């Protein structure tokens, strides 16, 4: 699906910069979505307070926070890992 984000042997520096910018845009979107999920989990009244004495609400909210912040952490790890690989590839190519 994201084959265009892979580097090829004949890529120019413009192609490399474009790939990094696209990765940064993807990272920014997913981080915003993750923080949005974590923020949304803390809003509003309890969900179905008559079921489990409000215990259902806690599980849903904590699950949403974990998914939101987990996606932020995972995508930031992915972005910095690929950025380090790009920097390493640049250093090796310039030797």
Image: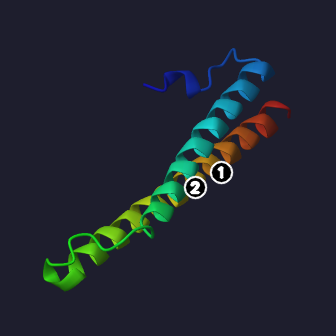
User: CB atoms at circles 1 and 2 under 8 Å apart?
Assistant: yes
10 w.r.t. 63: above or below: above
Q: Nearer the viewer, residue 58 or 77?
A: 58
Gap in Å between the C-alphas at discs 1 and 2? 5 Å
Quick one: label 2, few (<14), some, or many (20+) residues within 10 Å? few
Name the residue: 18% across, 85% down.
Answer: 53
* x, y percent for residue 43: 44, 67
For this view, does 78 lie left or right of residue 54? right
Which residue of the protein is positioned furthest toward the right in this rendering? 95
Please state, as top left, top right, bottom left or bottom right, where the C terminus lies in the image. Answer: top right
User: Which element type, helix, strand or loop, lies under badge 1?
Assistant: helix
User: Residue 32 appears at what percent x and percent y?
Assistant: 57, 50
Question: Relative to residue 51, is residue 8 depicted above or below?
Answer: above
Q: Nearer the viewer, residue 67 or 55?
A: 55
Label 2: state its secondary structure. Answer: helix
Q: Quick one: 22 or 58, which is closer to the camera?
A: 58
Task: Name the spot of residue 23 as percent of width and height, x first.
Answer: 62, 36
- Seen from this angle, which residue lies furthest top? 10
Q: Quadrant of the N terminus?
A: top left
Q: Residue at x 72, y 20 (%)?
A: 15
Q: Residue 67's image quarter?
A: bottom left
- Foreground: 29 or 3? 29
Query: In the image, what residue occupies the spot 37% across and 63% down?
Result: 64
Circle 2 sits on which residue? 77
Mark 1 burial class by Cα count in 10 Å: few <14, some 14-19, many 20+: few
> Which numbered dot is residue 80?
1
Q: How is the image coloured?
A: rainbow
- Quadrant hosting residue 59: bottom left
* Residue placed furthest toward the left: 51
Residue at 64 percent of width and 30 percent of height: 22
């Amino acid at each position: 699906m994201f084959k265009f984000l892979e580097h090829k042997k004949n890529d120019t520096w413009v192609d490399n910069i474009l790939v990094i910018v696209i990765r940064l845009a993807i990272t920014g979107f997913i981080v915003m979505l993750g923080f949005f999920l974590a923020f949304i989990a803390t809003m509003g009244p309890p969900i179905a307070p008559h079921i489990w004495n409000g215990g259902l609400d806690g599980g849903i909210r904590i699950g949403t926070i974990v998914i939101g912040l987990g996606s932020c952490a995972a995508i930031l790890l992915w972005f910095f890992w690929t950025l380090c690989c790009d920097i390493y590839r640049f250093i090796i190519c310039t030797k």
